[in-house]
Image (tube, rainbow, N blue to C red):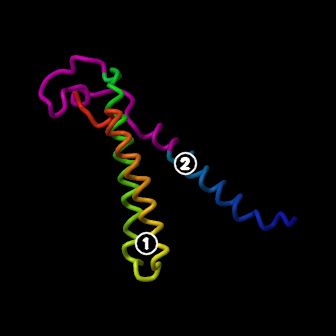
C-alpha cells in the first residue's frame, strides 16, 4: 500500500477544514456583538413578537414536507428515462412501469392512511 496516493485526499481534507475554521473565526471576529435597535425591531410583520421563536410545530408540517420531497424526487427520476426512451427499449419501459406501480402503491397507501388530509 502506497501512502503517497492518499496525499491529495489528505490535502483536500486539510484545506477544507482550514477554510471552514477560517470562516468561523472571521465571523466571530468581524460581527458586532451588541444588538442595535434596528435588529430588535419588528421585521416586516409590523408588530412585536408575542411568542417564543422556538415554539413547537405540528408534526403534519414535517410529514407533508417529507412526502413532497419523496414523491418529487421519484418523479424527477422520470426525466432521464423520458430523454433516453428510444435507447432503453422495451426493457426500460417495463422497468419504469414497475417503478410507477410501486410509486402508485405508496401514494395510495399514504392516501388511505390519511397522510394527505389536512384538518
Q: Residue 64 in the image: x percent, y percent?
A: 33, 38
Decide which of 29, 92 is in the foreground and name it.
92
35 within the magenta span? yes
Quadrant occupied by the C terminus: top left
SS for dot 2 = helix
Question: Does residue 40 lie above or below 44 as drawn?
Answer: above
First in sequence, mark 1 or 2: give its number: 2
Label 1: which secondary element: helix
Q: Residue beneath label 1, please?
A: 93
Residue at x 57%, y 45% (from the top left corner): 21
Q: Residues within 10 Å of mark 1 (few under 14, many from 20)?
A: some
Depicted 69 relative to depicted 85: above or below:
above
Q: Name the mark nearer the viewer: 1 or 2.
A: 1
The residue lying at 31 percent from left, 27 percent from top is 35
| Location of residue 109 by image quarter | top left
Depth check, front residue: 59 or 50: 59
Badge number at residue 104: none
- Relative side of 119 to 74, left or right: left
The range drawn in magenta is 24-52
Name the residue at 13% across, 23% down.
47
Q: CA distance from mark 1 to mark 2?
A: 46 Å
Q: Residue furthest right?
A: 1
User: Residue 69 at x, y = what percent?
Assistant: 37, 48
Q: Name the mark on residue 20.
A: 2
Q: Quadrant of residue 50?
A: top left
Q: Residue at 35% across / 21% down in the picture?
A: 56
Amino acid at each position: 500500500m502506497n501512502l503517497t496516493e492518499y496525499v491529495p485526499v489528505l490535502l483536500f481534507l486539510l484545506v477544507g477544514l482550514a477554510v471552514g475554521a477560517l470562516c468561523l473565526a472571521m465571523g466571530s471576529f468581524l460581527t458586532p456583538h451588541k444588538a442595535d435597535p434596528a435588529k430588535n425591531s419588528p421585521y416586516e410583520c409590523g408588530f412585536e413578537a408575542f411568542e417564543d421563536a422556538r415554539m413547537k410545530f405540528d408534526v403534519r408540517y414535517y410529514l407533508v414536507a417529507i412526502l413532497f420531497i419523496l414523491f418529487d424526487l421519484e418523479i424527477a427520476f422520470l426525466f432521464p428515462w423520458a430523454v433516453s426512451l428510444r435507447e432503453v427499449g422495451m426493457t426500460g419501459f417495463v422497468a419504469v412501469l414497475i417503478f410507477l406501480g410501486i410509486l402508485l402503491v405508496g401514494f395510495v397507501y399514504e392516501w388511505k392512511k390519511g397522510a394527505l388530509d389536512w384538518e
